[in-house]
Amino acid sequence: MNKLKAVLASAGLSAALGFAGSAAAQSNLASWYIGGTLGQSDFKDGCQGLGSCDKKDTAWGVLGGYQFNRNFAAEFGYRDLGKASAPGGDTKGNAWELTGIGALPLVDQFSVYGKLGAYRGELKAAAAKETNSDFTYGAGVQYDFTKAVGVRGEWQRYNKMGGGALAKTDVDVLSVGVIYHFQ
């Protein structure tokens, strides 16, 4: 079932990128960009059955992408999700992701956006390590100080990480980030 989800997500992303690619010919805003984020993760079910634990930690990420026009972009990134800490040990997480972004500019420099894609993530505990793929999605706002530099605030969910020897958990990340467009 997870493979079917990954295939469907890839097909949807490919269709969106194909549409965005044709729209890029009409826009002079097309450019490559890089960025970084810093925020807080929340392992939603990271403490299930463990009693008292701290399921929030610092999360950070790096990303690169291509802005097709004002409304569409594709991103590839890595996110360190931090850990959930319990008396019996920590559960650490990270994910590689490929997402499509749809943005709605509200004024010249300010926009809201949604993102949808797939991730390949890993959860590690003392004697167990589980790797899986599933959907990731989120929403945010972006303010562009110049054509080259922007700042983001976003929420993103990594759906059903783990499994097998580790309990599946959704991981939410609230973050701020800086984006640099190559002009």
Image (tube, grey):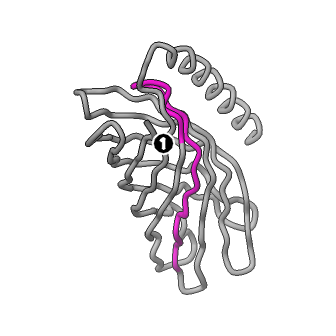
Name the image quarter holding residue 70.
Answer: top left
Amino acid type of disc 1? Tyr
In this view, the residue in front, 115 or 1, is 115
Left or right: 16 in relation to 138? right
The residue at which mark 1 appears reads as 33
The vertical placement of 61 against 154, above or below, is: below
Quarter in which the C terminus is drawn: top left
Q: Mark 1 falls on what kind of element? A: strand
The vertical placement of 147 against 80, above or below, is: above
The vertical placement of 31 against 42, above or below, is: above
- Give the residue at x 57% y 50%: 77
In this view, the residue in front, 123 or 29, is 29
Looking at the rendered structure, the number of numbered marks drawn on it comes to 1
Q: Is residue 79 magenta?
A: yes
**Magenta region:** 65-85
* Magenta-colored segment: predominant secondary structure: strand
Left or right: 20 in relation to 36? right
Q: Which residue occupies the extreme front position in the image?
A: 183
